[in-house]
C-alpha cells in the first residue's frame, strides 16, 4: 500500500484535475452531439430539398401528362367529329344511291308494264269480225245444265255459246252478250244449281253484292238471303258509289222483274260487312258467294284469307262459290299492291292446299285458255261493253276465274 503521504498527494492531484477533465469530456460530447445534430439537420434539409424537387418534378410531369391527355382528347374529339362527318357523308351518299336504285327499279317495273301494255294494245287492234260477236250469242232455248262445272275454271267463249248460258241470262233479265261479268253470274248460279244448293229454305250469304241481280234471283227461289256490302263511307272513299257498284241498303237490290216485292222483303236481309273482318255471327249458311269482290281487299294474301273465312260461315257440306281476277300472262309477275290485285295460278294452288289442309274440298282448277275468236281478243281501257272476256290490266292479260269450295265435316 503506498505511504499515507503519497495517497494524500494523489487525492489532491485528482481533485485538482477532475473538474477540468469532466468539462472537457462534456464539451466533447456536446460537440459530437451538435455535429451529429448538424449532420442530421443538413441531411433532413437535403432530403426536403430533394423531396421538393421530386414533388415539383412530379407536378410538372402530371401537368405535362394532363396537357398531353387534353391534347389527345382534343385530337380524338376532332378525329371523331371528322369521322362522324365522314360517316354521315357516306351514309347520305348510300341513302341517295338507295333512293336512286329504288327509283330505277320502279322505273324498270313501270317500263316493263308499259311494254306489256303496248304489246297488249297491239293485240287489241285485232278486234274480231263484228259478225262473230255483234248480236251474238244467238238466243236459244235451254235449261240449267248438269255437270257443267265439275272444276274451278276460267272464263271462256265456249260457255256463252251453250243453251244453259242463254237460260241463266234470261232468268237474270240480262242481254245475252260476250261479257265476263255475265259469265261470273252464270257460273255462280250454275255451280250452285248442279250441286243442289238452291232450294226453298236454304240460307245464302252474299259478300260485296253491289248492284248485282243474284240476291233477288235467290230470294225468288225461296232462299233466305243475307246480302252484305261495305259501309257507305268506305264505299264512297273507294269510288264504288260513283261507279254505281255499291249497295247502300236492301232497296238497292230489289229487282221486281225477278222477284216480287213481298217475297223479296220476306227472304232478304241486308247488312254492312267488312270482308277483311267477317263477324262471327255470320254462320250456319248453306252457301255463300261473291262476284269479283275479294281482289279488292288490299293484297293477294287478304283475298286468300277471305276465301278461307267465307268457308267458315257455312254448315258442314255447304258450298262457297267465288269469282275473281286471274292473271293469265304470268305465274311470277303480278299486281299485289293496288286497289285491284291479280291472282296467279300459284296463288290459287296455294289456296287449294290451305283449304284442303283444313279438311275442305276444292274443285280442281282448269286454267286452260279458250281457243275461240273472242278468247283471243284483249280489251283495253276504256273497256268495251262487248266483247269483253279478256282485258289488259297494268300490263297483264287477265280474265275471270271461278272457285268452287265445299266445307268439310
Image (tube, rainbow, N blue to C red):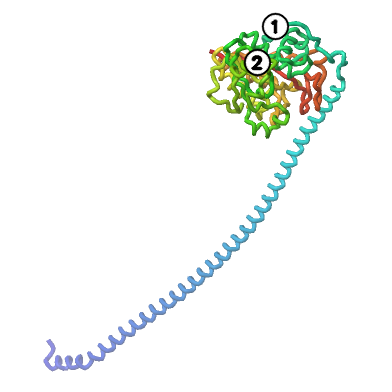
Kindly identify which numbered label has been placed on residue 369.
none
Q: Is residue 229 above or below residue 24?
A: above
| Quadrant of the image containing the N terminus | bottom left
Q: Using a 10 Å C-alpha cutoff, classify the residue at mark 1 as few (fewer than 14 neighbours), some (14 to 19) or many (20 or more).
A: some
Residue pointed to by mark 2: 260
Q: Residue furthest front?
A: 262
149 relative position to 17: left or right: right
Residue 145: x and y in percent read 70, 6
**Which quarter of the figure has residue 395?**
top right
- Res 355 seen here: no
Residue occupied by mark 1: 145
Q: Determine the residue positioned at 79% across, 25% down.
A: 392
In percent of width and height, residue 209 lies at 66, 22
The residue lying toward the viewer, choosing from 25 and 113, is 113
Report the residue at 78% width, 34% height from top.
108
Judge whether 197 appears above or below 382 on screen: above
Amino acid at each position: 500500500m503506498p505511504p499515507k503521504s503519497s495517497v494524500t498527494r494523489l487525492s489532491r492531484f485528482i481533485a485538482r484535475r477532475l473538474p477540468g477533465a469532466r468539462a472537457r469530456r462534456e464539451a466533447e460530447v456536446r460537440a459530437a452531439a451538435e455535429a451529429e445534430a448538424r449532420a442530421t439537420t443538413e441531411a433532413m434539409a437535403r432530403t426536403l430539398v430533394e423531396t421538393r424537387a421530386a414533388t415539383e418534378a412530379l407536378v410538372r410531369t402530371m401537368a405535362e401528362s394532363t396537357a398531353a391527355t387534353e391534347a389527345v382528347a382534343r385530337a380524338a374529339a376532332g378525329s371523331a367529329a371528322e369521322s362522324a362527318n365522314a360517316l354521315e357523308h357516306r351514309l347520305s351518299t348510300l341513302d341517295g344511291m338507295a333512293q336512286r336504285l329504288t327509283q330505277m327499279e320502279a322505273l324498270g317495273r313501270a317500263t316493263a308494264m308499259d311494254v306489256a301494255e303496248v304489246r297488249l294494245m297491239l293485240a287489241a287492234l285485232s278486234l274480231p269480225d263484228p259478225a262473230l260477236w255483234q248480236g251474238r250469242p244467238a238466243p236459244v232455248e235451254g235449261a240449267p245444265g248438269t255437270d257443267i262445272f265439275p272444276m274451278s275454271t276460267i272464263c271462256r267463249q265456249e260457255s256463252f255459246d251453250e243453251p244453259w248460258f242463254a237460260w241463266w241470262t234470261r232468268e237474270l233479265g240480262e242481254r245475252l252478250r260476250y261479257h265476263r261479268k255475265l259469265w261470273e253470274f252464270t257460273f255462280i248460279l250454275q255451280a250452285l244449281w248442279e250441286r243442289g244448293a238452291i232450294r226453298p229454305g236454304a240460307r245464302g250469304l252474299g259478300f260485296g253484292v253491289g248492284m248485282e241481280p243474284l240476291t233477288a234471283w235467290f230470294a225468288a227461289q225461296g232462299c233466305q238471303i243475307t246480302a252484305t256490302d261495305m259501309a257507305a263511307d268506305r264505299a264512297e272513299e273507294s269510288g264504288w258509289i260513283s261507279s254505281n257498284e255499291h249497295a247502300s241498303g236492301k232497296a238497292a237490290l230489289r229487282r221486281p222483274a225477278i222477284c216480287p216485292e213481298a217475297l223479296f222483303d220476306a227472304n232478304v236481309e241486308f247488312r254492312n260487312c267488312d270482308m277483311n273482318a267477317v263477324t262471327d255471327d255470320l254462320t250456319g249458311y248453306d252457301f255463300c258467294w261473291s262476284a269479283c269482290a275479294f281482289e279488292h281487299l288490299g293484297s293477294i294474301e287478304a283475298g286468300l284469307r277471305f276465301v278461307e273465312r267465307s268457308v267458315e260461315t257455312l254448315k258442314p257440306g255447304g258450298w262457297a262459290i267465288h269469282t275473281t281476277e286471274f292473271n293469265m300472262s304470268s305465274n311470277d309477275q303480278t299486281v299485289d299492291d293496288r286497289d285491284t290485285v291479280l291472282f296467279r295460278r300459284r296463288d290459287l294452288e296455294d289456296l287449294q292446299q290451305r283449304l284442303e289442309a283444313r279438311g275442305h274440298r276444292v274443285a280442281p282448277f282448269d286454267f286452260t285458255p279458250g281457243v275461240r275468236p273472242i278468247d283471243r281478243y284483249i280489251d283495253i281501257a276504256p273497256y268495251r261493253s262487248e266483247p269483253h272476256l279478256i282485258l289488259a290490266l297494268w300490263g297483264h292479260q287477265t280474265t275471270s276465274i271461278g272457285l268452287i269450295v265445299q266445307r268439310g265435316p
